[in-house]
Amino acid sequence: MNIVVCIKQVPDTAEVRINPETGTLIREGVPSIINPFDMHAIEAGLYIKEKTGGKVTVITMGPPQAETALREAISMGADEGVLLSDRAFAGSDTWATSFTLSKAIAKLRADVIFCGKQAIDGDTAQVGPETAEFLNIPHISYIRKIEEVSQNGIRVQRLMDEGYDVIESALPVLLTVVKELNEPRLPSLKGKMTAKKAVIKKWGQADIMADENDLGLKGSPTQVKNIFSPEARPGRKMLEGTPEEQVDALMQELRGIKCL
């Protein structure tokens, strides 16, 4: 079984700041993490490998420093990492990102592709399904359980507002996962040593044989014109402390304005 997991390196949301003059995110000095939903996708890929055998390849698109995310995935048990990094990819929206990923995944000849349901920085939940459409393969979103998997197909549960659907699909297929699916494993010492020595494949435009007009800003039908922090409203305050301390502080505030 050839399993591919798409991941994204994102800023730690607790540390995000915005430059008030340029309206852009301040990334300098901001720690980066693997998108939390993608951690569950990695675990799902490793689960399939343990059930059926095969190989897990983790792929990401980003700047050179995104290599650290791939090494973390390898330390968890993934076999290989592929970094898509090229100036031609810069400024990609979800459409251009999905197209770029699809070209790379087609080269990897995947049987099962996993993605997190969405990235915590963009929150669009578009890249997984769009990638499947570019690959012209079926996709199933919001996977909460893998019931059965074999070389012939897969049966999963898809999380819905009121319960779940049971869906079967032939391979290849792309699945986006939710956090209810599993508990991501911690890297072992052996895994960390393997990740440190691993050779990360680096692919650019030429490697995936894509037209530059379909990539980056040129291939993006949407563009972000501005980003800004909402202005703080007068009289608002943030309650600090543990949940219990916050509840006590809130009760005090409500008593102060005679709402209790």
Image: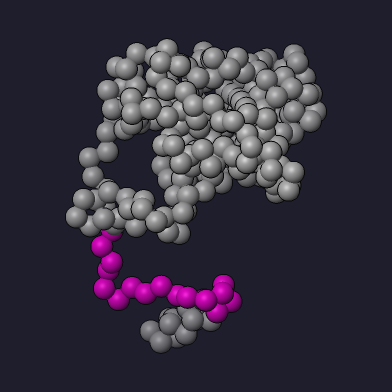
The location of residue 143, given as percent across then percent down, is 64, 34
Q: Main secondary structure of the magenta part?
A: loop
- Left or right, 214 with reference to 170: left
Q: Is residue 247 visible?
A: no
Q: Is residue 49 above or below residue 133?
A: below
Q: Is residue 194 visible?
A: yes
The location of residue 171, given as percent across then percent down, is 66, 15
Q: Is residue 159 above or below residue 237?
A: above
Specify the segment rendered in magenta.
Answer: 230-246
Q: What residue is drawn where x is 27% and y is 23%?
A: 218
Q: What residue is drawn where x is 70% and y is 49%?
A: 186
Magenta span contains residue 33: no
Q: What residue is drawn where x is 34% and y is 22%?
A: 215
* Quarter that holds the N terminus: top right
Foreground residue among 206 and 143: 206
The location of residue 189, given as percent across then percent down, is 73, 48
Question: Outermost residue, front direction?
Answer: 197
Place residue 153 in its image quadrant: top right
The location of residue 178, given as percent across then percent down, is 61, 40
Foreground residue among 91 and 167: 91
Q: Is residue 97 above or below residue 19?
A: above
Tag count? 0
Place residue 74 in its image quadrant: top right
Q: What residue is drawn where x is 45% and y is 16%?
A: 208
Q: Is residue 89 above or below residue 16?
A: above
- Left or right, 147 with reference to 102: right
- Left or right, 124 with reference to 19: right
Question: Outermost residue, left direction?
Answer: 21
Figure colour scheme: one colour
